[in-house]
Amino acid sequence: MQEADYKNKLSELETDIYQQAVAFLEKGQRKKAAEKLDELLAQKKDFIPALNKKAVIYVYQKEFKQAQNLLNTIITKDPEYAPAITNLGSIEKELGNYKEAKKMYYRAVEVEAEYGPAYNNLGVIFREEGNYAKSVKYLKKARKFGSLSHSLDPDKAFYQDKGCLFVLFLVIILIVILYIILF
């Protein structure tokens, strides 16, 4: 099952707690993320995405055995949860077991053909091995399927490139000048 399917089963409060945990994790605030995940798991002990995020925190802390145990538990409950399979692959890669890592990434895309992070990780491994053709192939797939999540923050501008604003400013000036000349 995909993460969205699991999230659809949460109450509004549980969804809010999970989103807070993910936001903390994305900001690198792993302690706060772990606290929120624990809060959610106290209510929903088998919520697979939260268990997976806990495993990610263990990976960041280099507690690979604990992460592997949790990820294997997840896969026992849902053998087709691609994020957990991919995270097991990432642990194997971190431990230098590239062959096993690739097996896990291939398994992840086998169960979820559009799971971008697994393609991204395959692309990285092939690049590190010097197989640039395969690296490009998988990185293109990662880009196609979106290996990064983007969320809009209402407190930040949606544009990132200041050059874009300059071009927009020039276009507006040009339109004003043409309007003055023609009318």
Image (tube, rainbow, N blue to C red):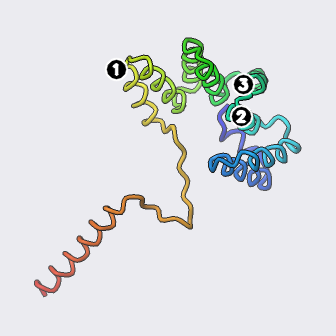
Q: Amino acid at mark 1?
A: Ala
Q: Position of residue 100 (x, y in %)?
A: 59, 13
Label 1 neighbourhood size at 10 Å, few (<14), some (14-19), many (20+)?
few
Q: Is residue 180 left or right of residue 73?
A: left
Q: Position of residue 63 (x, y in %)?
A: 74, 28
Q: Amino acid at mark 2?
A: Gln
Residue for point 54% across, 58% down: 152
Residue for point 43% across, 25% down: 138
Label 2 neighbourhood size at 10 Å, few (<14), some (14-19), many (20+)?
few
Which residue lies under the disc numbered 1? 133
Q: Which image quarter: residue 38?
A: top right
- In the figure, 1 relative to 107: above or below? below
Q: Amino acid at mark 3?
A: Phe
**Does dot 3 land on a helix, a strand or a loop?**
helix
The residue nearer to you, when weighing 56 against 154, is 56
Q: Which residue reaches farthest left?
A: 182
Q: Which residue reaches farthest top?
A: 99
Which residue lies under the disc numbered 3? 64
Which residue lies under the disc numbered 2? 61
Residue for point 75% across, 36% down: 54
Q: Is residue 42 left or right of residue 27?
A: right
For the N terminus, which image quadrant?
top right
> What is the C-alpha distance between the residues marked 1 and 3?
31 Å
Label 3 neighbourhood size at 10 Å, few (<14), some (14-19), many (20+)?
many
Q: Is residue 80 left or right of residue 10?
A: left
